[in-house]
Amino acid sequence: MPYVNIKITDEQVSAEQKAQLIQGATQLLVDVLNKNPKTTVVVIDEVNTDNWGIGGEVVTKLRKQTT
């Protein structure tokens, strides 16, 4: 049973976008590894930008610098 964990920052990702991620990840495993989609698990974790860092900086701060 394949298990895919997608981690994204919590920034207004719509239910439709999440559904597309789940479908796409599932289909990728079907196409590449011939896995059964009925036993493929996809979990999306949304992480607050205060809890996500890039290059030693908190993403919340980085996002404010670009606006």
Image (cartoon, grey):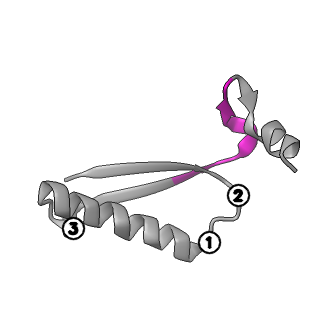
Q: Could you tell me how far apart the alpha carbons at marks 2 and 1 are, in whole angstroms?
A: 9 Å
Q: Which mark is residue 23?
A: none
Read off the residue under disc 1: 14
Q: Which mark is residue 11?
A: 2
Q: Secondary structure at mark 1?
A: loop
Read off the residue under disc 3: 37
Rendering coords of residue 52 (x, y %):
67, 37
Residue placed at 21% from the left, 69% from the top? 38
Q: Amino acid at mark 2?
A: Glu
Q: Which residues are magenta?
A: 45-55
Q: Could you tell me how far apart the alpha carbons at marks 1 and 3 are, in whole angstroms?
A: 23 Å
Q: Is residue 36 left or right of residue 8?
A: left
Q: Decide: is 52 above or below 36.
A: above
- Single out the residue that lies furthest toward the front: 66
Q: Are marks 2 and 1 in contact (CB under 8 Å)?
A: no
Q: Decide: is 20 above or below 34.
A: below
Tell me the crowding category of disc 3: few under 14, some 14 to 19, or many 20 or more residues within 10 angstroms, Cα based.
Answer: some
